[in-house]
Image (cartoon, rainbow, N blue to C red):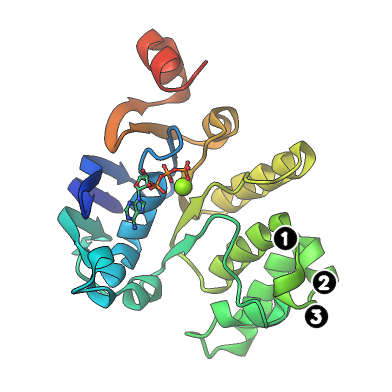
Amino acid sequence: MYLEIKNLSVHYDTAQVLNKVNLSVEKGELVSLVGPNGAGKTTLLRTISGLVNWEKETLKGTKLGRITIDGEVIFDGERIDTTRAHKIAAKGLVLCPERGKPFREMTIKENLMAGSYLYRDKTDIKQNLEKVYSLFPVLKERETQISGTISGGERTMLAIGRALMSQARLMLVDEPSTGLSPLLRDELFKRLEEIHGQGLTILLVEQDVGYAFEIATRNYVISNGHIVGEGTAKELLADEMIRKAYLGL
Ligand SMILES: Nc1ncnc2c1ncn2[C@@H]1O[C@H](COP(=O)(O)OP(=O)(O)OP(=O)(O)O)[C@@H](O)[C@H]1O
Ligand SMILES: [Mg+2]
């Protein structure tokens, strides 16, 4: 397994947000994780990326720092559950947060270039930038625009673009459909499918089950911090309990 999560639990102060989560992603897969608001999806991605650990260390001694993390996260054969967030990113495990989180005072192009800060090979960087621009032409059109002023959809594309600039090997994408018009949603999911088709492994968190199931090879359903279902779209949709109780279909 490329990414393996074993019995992962996260408590924030009094609330348990993840409860013995087991989830895995094989190299080359596009796995989706769906579930209602507050189920723990973002927390799972942030835990994998080392951000919950960072929060725990940084806020130690304060009420917000009362976090416990149990279980294992293994990426490419290596345990990373106590690895620092920037080192995890440097291994190629890259998070695209919901609605992106660009450096607001930098231009689109500067944000994209920031994604490649680990690379020195100028031809690689140039090729990656061209690839990102061909996937998302609007980023090229607006490359000199300050990122604090771009739209939500453009921020999402920028976050994915930045991950591609960093030569991500496993991309964690959090709710890329948030705030997008149906047209832009269609477009974005096509691009994700294309990126996956080019060989990138993706773990996609998405509330829109229709979109997620359409492009994913395998899916997990999470509710209340528990994984309550796992399988292909066909398998999950054939399970009436899952369909009614968790997918609202
Ligand atoms: N720092 C925190 N302290 C306390 N509780 C938190 C913290 N972060 C998240 N939570 C709680 O954990 C639960 C899961 O949150 P999370 O953001 O992971 O859900 P989600 O599945 O991503 O939801 P959504 O679909 O709305 O994005 C929520 O009840 C949330 O309020
Ligand atoms: Mg979320």
Residue that numbered label 3 is attached to: 144
Secondary structure at badge 2 equals: loop
Residue that numbered label 1 is attached to: 154
Give me the C-alpha separation between circle 3 and circle 2.
Answer: 6 Å
Nearest the eye: 34 or 115: 34
Report if the CB atoms under discs 3 and 2 are less than 8 Å apart. Answer: yes
Label 2: how many Cα within 10 Å (few below 14, some 14–19, many 20+): some
Residue that numbered label 2 is attached to: 142
For residue 2, above or below residue 142: above
Residue at left offset 36%, top offset 11%: 241
Residue at left offset 23%, top offset 74%: 57
Secondary structure at badge 3 equals: loop
Residue 106: mark in rendering: none
* Three-letter amino acid code of the residue under disc 2: Arg
For residue 124, above or below residue 70: below
Q: Farthest residue toward the right?
A: 141
For residue 190, above or below residue 210: below
Give me the C-alpha separation between circle 1 and circle 2.
Answer: 9 Å
